[in-house]
Every structure is written in structure tokens, then in C-alpha cells.
Amino acid sequence: MWALLLQWYRRRFSDPQAIALLIILVAAFGILFFFSGLLAPLLVAMVLAYLLEWPTVRLERMGCSRTVATALVLTVFAGILLLMVLVVAPVAWQQGINLTRDMPNMLNKLYHFAAGLPRRFPALVDAGIIDIIVENLRSRLTGLGDSVVKYSLASLVGLLTLAIYLILVPLMVFFLLKDKQHFLNAVRRVLPRNRGLAGQVWSEMNQQITNYIRGKVLEMVVVGVATWIGFAVLGLNYALLLAVLVGFSVLIPYIGAMVVTVPVICVGLFQWGAGGDFWTMLVVYLIIQALDGNLLVPVLFSEAVNLHPLVIILSVVIFGGLWGFWGVFFAIPLATLVKAVVHAWPDTLLLDDE
């Protein structure tokens, strides 16, 4: 047994570059695992820096200095965010309040619909079970309302933290973009010298992370806008709020689409019942989801779609459990990193055969 373990160790860890890669990965994992809360502003800034690197480089190639290009890109990006906050956020917030107020009516309508099921299908549905389910839903909705109030009061405490982030994050993004090469050189001086294998993995992952962040933001915008247009044309209530939810649902592959479908169906049934308008809305929604999954995602994430769906779901569960939102957001790049490391890891037995 020990001989087999020793043979495996010599095959996999006799290369100094493999040891350097292992040290870098363990150190990065430890830092993110133990200090993810403290590093949250830096993570946000790094994501935004990856997102804004492309227009910054284009302006730099047009003759602008790195500082001027960074300032221009950040100004335009801040203007877009401010426009969204002033235009989209108030409407979505008001629709969310209206939806909360309509929940009791939706529950009553659901109860009247469910109460008729035992008469229509006496052999399949028991009236007592329907009453238990509805009462359970009512109690949960009541508890949900109390939780929202408590969360709103608790969130007031976090306003100071949010204000600090609103100052720190833009400054971090500015310096990460402006002094990108300086920071990369500083990191290289800290890393081990035998890092050829780590550099190979990093070069591949750096490009994939860049494409992933840009593609994910573009996918959110395209899916959200397409959903809003479809729902608005059909006259669905809370169209903007539901479109925002659908747009954010693409952050969680597969799971997000299934979860956000529930409120879409519930709102459609409450507004129209199981009539022709509801089925038209559902068909439009499913068409948007199908185009996203079969056309938009393969175009934007040509490398990521090579991962098996089960691998993606497991990555969301595992990395989401480790790092919360950021684990979910970077689940696909992290899974791709694991795949790249496994493929690039040296095997002395194979090298000797060659």
C-alpha cells in the first residue's frame, strides 16, 4: 500500500513546477476561504476591472494614456450605473411593493382554485390536504413579511458599510486599471521562481475569466431586456421586476432558471388564469430561455459549455457553499480551473514514456 502511495507521489510531485503550482493554489484557497468577507470590496473591484479592461485597452490603442483612458471608461460606466439606479431601480422597487401587497389576493385565488380540485378529481385530491397546504403557505407568507421588516431594519446598520464600499470600490477599480502592470509585477516577485506550470495555467484562466465576466454581464443584460420587452408587450404585471429577476437568474446555471420560473408562472396565473394569454406568455418566456441556453450561452461561453451539466451544478453547490455569492458567480471558471490544472499537471511516467 505504502509502495503504491509512494509511486503515485513520485509520479505527480517530483516536478518542482508542480510543487510551486500546488503551493500557489493552496495559498489562494486559504486566503479566499478565511478572508473572503474582508476581501469582498477587492473582489468586486477586480470583477469590474476585468469588465472594463477591454474598453480601456481600446482607448489606449487610440492614443489615450492609461490614466486618461481609465478615467474616461470609469466615468461612462458610472453614468450608466447611475441611469439604471435612477430609472430601473425605482420602478422595480415599486413593482416589488405592489407584488407584496397582492400576495394575499393571489393566495386566496389559489385557495379557491385548489378547493375545487377535490370536487373535480375526488379520487386524486383530498380536501383536507388542500387546507393544510394553504394554511402552511399563509403562515409562511406571514413569517416572510415579518422577516422582510426585520431585514429592512437590520439593513439600516449596513448603510454605513455600503457608503464606504461606494467610495472604496471605484478607487480600487481606478488603481487596478491604471496600475495593472505594476500590480502584476509585484505579484510575480512574490511567487516561487519555478512557476512555469502555474504561469501556463494562469494565462489560460486569465483569458477565460475575462471572457466569462464580460459574457455573463452581456447575457444578463440581453436576457433581462428581452424578457422585459416580451412581458411588457403582453401586458404582464410586474414586467420589469420579473425581467430583473430573470436577468439575475443567469448567474446560477440551470438552478436559477428553474427557480425564477415559479414567480413568472404564479403572476401569469393570477393575472390571466389558465387561459390563452397565460399560455402565450409562457411560450414567449420558454422561447427566451431556449434561445439563451442554446444560442447565447454557446456563443458567449464556448469554452465553458464543454463542461458537463452535472459538473456545473456540482460546482455551483460546492463553491457556493464555500464562498457564497462569489462561489456561485465564479463556479464555471473555478470548475474550468480545476479541469485545466488536472490536464496540465505533469505525470513523470507519461513523460518517461515519451
Image (cartoon, helix red, strand yellow):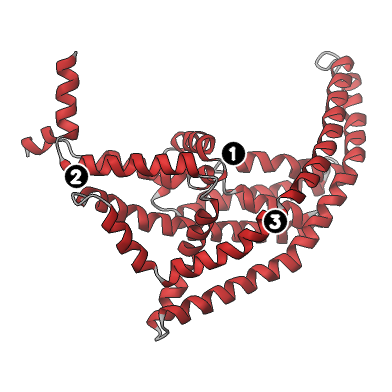
Q: Nearer the viewer, mark 1 or mark 3?
A: 3
Q: With 127 as the anchor, is 330 left or right in this view?
A: left
Whole-number angstrom distance, CA of label 2 to CA of label 1: 38 Å
Of the residues tagged 3 and 2, which is closer to the observer? 3
Quadrant showing the N terminus: top left
Q: Would residue 116 be found to the left or right of residue 325 on screen?
A: right
The quadrant the C terminus occupies is top left
Is residue 248 visible from the viewing direction of this image?
Answer: yes
Identity of the residue drawn at 21% across and 41% down: 18
In the image, residue 337 lies at what x, y percent? 36, 45
SS for callout 1: helix
Q: Residue flagged by tag 2: what amino acid is it?
A: Gln
The residue most toward the bottom is 63
- Viewer-proximal residue, 310 or 123? 310
Residue 158 vertical placement versus 61 (above, below): above
**Is tag 1's residue or tag 3's residue first in the polypeptide sequence?**
3
Dot 2, how many residues are within 10 Å of its Cα: few (below 14), some (14-19), or many (20+)?
A: many
The answer to whether mark 3 and mark 2 are in CB contact below 8 A is no
Residue identified by numbered label 2: 17
Residue 46 position, x and y percent, is 47, 59
Residue topped by disc 3 = 160
Given the image, on which type of amino acid does mark 1 rest? Ile
**Quadrant location of residue 165?**
bottom right
Mark 1, residue position: 255
Closer to us: 331 or 132: 331
At a point 55% along the width and 45% down the height, the residue shown is: 37
Q: Residue at x 39, y 67 (%)?
A: 180
Earlier residue among tags 3 and 2: 2
